[in-house]
Amino acid sequence: MNFEHPLLLLSVLIGVIFIIAGFIVLKFPPKKINSLYGYRTKSSMKNKEQWKFAQKYSSILMIYCGIGLLLIGCLLYFILGDINPIIGMLIGMVSMFVSIGIMLYKTETAIKQQFKSE
């Protein structure tokens, strides 16, 4: 097993970062709306209630996406074997961007559904 393979390294490293960041935001959510820390979009920063909801929802999604990245990276590594490192790196990067897209889409959709009247 090649632990230095980009597919395995990228997926595992990014997955672990997502899980740690998700737990940090979940356990220590930002108290005030800010442009530095937490889930920051126009809809999440609209008011304090939406901010609080977005922090909790997005941090849980980030943990799930991190676990998914870990699993996908390991499974693909074992299925595809020792593929070209450049292709492995591309697969890792694409899976990361897809995870970020899923988190953004699902969180924004949840904010819109939760706060329909506003």
Image (spheres, rainbow, N blue to C red):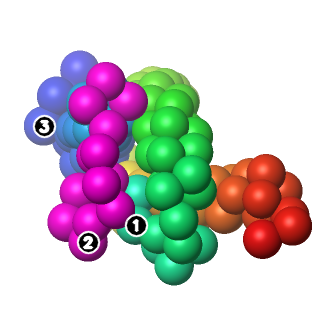
Residue 40: which numbered mark, if any?
1
Q: Nearer the viewer, residue 38 or 80?
A: 38
> For residue 37: magenta?
yes
Instruction: Check disc 3: other Cα within 10 Å, few if <14, some if 14-19, many if 20+.
Output: few
Find numbered disc 3 in the image and state the secondary structure of the residue it sits on. loop
Q: Residues within 10 Å of mark 2 (few under 14, many from 20)?
A: few
Which residue is denoted by mark 2 in the rendering?
A: 35
Taken as a whole, is the magenta stretch helix, strand or loop?
loop
108 over 92 or under it: above or below: below
Say which residue appears at 23% left-offset and 57% top-offset.
37
Q: Is residue 75 above or below residue 10?
A: above
Q: Is residue 62 left or right of residue 27?
A: right
* Residue 14 position within the rendered picture, expressed as x and y whole percent measured from the top left: 28, 43
Q: Which residue is mark 3?
A: 4
Q: The N terminus is located in which quarter?
A: top left
Stretch of the chain drawn in magenta: 26-38
Mark 1 is surrounded, within 10 Å at the Cα level, by few (under 14), some (14 to 19) or many (20 or more) other residues, namely some
Front tag of 1 and 3: 1
Task: Please tell me whether residue 46 is drawn above or below residue 74 in the rendered image.
Answer: below
What residue lies at 47% left-to-right and 69% top-to-bottom?
45
Please give the name of the residue rendered at 26% of the width and 72% of the height, measured from the top-left corner: 35
